[in-house]
Image (cartoon, rainbow, N blue to C red):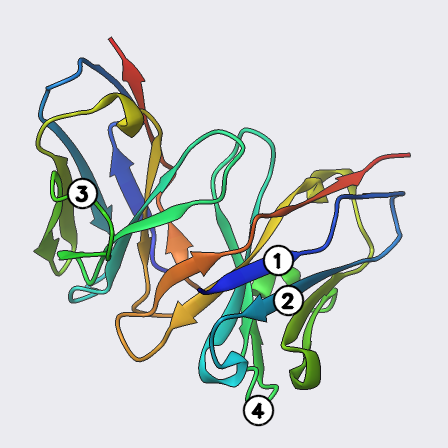
Amino acid sequence: DIQMTQSPSSLSASVGDRVTITCRTSQYISNYLNWYQQKPGKAPKLLIYGASSLQSGVPSRFSGSGSGTDFTLTISSLQPEDFATYYCQQSYSIPRTFGQGTKVEIK
Amino acid sequence: QVQLVQSGAEVKKPGASVKVSCKASGYTFTGYYMHWVRQAPGQGLEWMGWINPNSGDTNYAQKFQGRVSMTRDTSISTAYLELSSLRSDDTAVFYCVRVDTGSYGESDYWGQGTLVTVSS
């Protein structure tokens, strides 16, 4: 199984801050890496697919980069509605695996 | 618009089985794989397996082999997840998830989730 290591596990930030979350995989996955946002009591929402493609309807302040084993999710200017938990997921092989999540909290 | 509507919350006793349904609308049901993902309270996301609604083929995570079954009824565009021999640590929210296998395999639409509580 491909292991996913997300960091940090949590962070505190202020509105307007630039936030970066990283995801490292234990094996090469090309760019088969997706990012999801989850708010309490809600289903996850797709933000980024294929490492860097923005899902339709997602604000452009979200961006993704990386390939191979190292990936990054960046929020260029944190907004109040962005406080949530973020997960990476690899879709390169079965079983699909997720990172452990990064909780973004208000500073 | 694409919608995945899941059945309601369930309370089960240890050793019992549960069957969760996921009704799809707004797209061709047989054109996309359906995956199932669960989330224990306060925990992360755990992939359980997939079903190809067109063929009925399935692929389960090894952890659930032998006690999970994913089926579908194409006449009503509904996928099902059945989990047997329930234990207290199976308490979780279960999500059905549409996957775009023609792209990067991303999960582009999620059901609202079904809470299954296992308690004596």
Closer to the chain start, of discs 2 and 1, is 1
Whether residue A49 sits left or right of residue B114 in the image: it is: left
Name the kind of residue labelled 2 in the image. Answer: Lys
Residue shown at 60% from the left, 48% from the top:
B113
Which amino acid, by three-letter code, is at mark 4?
A: Ser
SS at mark 4 in the image = loop
Asked whether the residues under marks 4 and 3 belong to the same chain, the reply is no
Q: Chain of mark 2?
A: B
Where disc 2 sits, the SS reads strand
Q: For this rendering, which residue is in front, A43 or A100?
A: A43
Badge nearest the viewer, 4 or 3: 3
User: Closer to the camera, A97 or B105?
Assistant: B105
Residue that carries the numbered disc 3 in the rendered image: A59
CA gap, disc 3 and disc 1: 26 Å
Assign the N terminus of chain A to one quadrant of the image: bottom left
Residue identifier under label 4: B55
Callout 2 touching callout 1 (CB < 8 Å) = yes
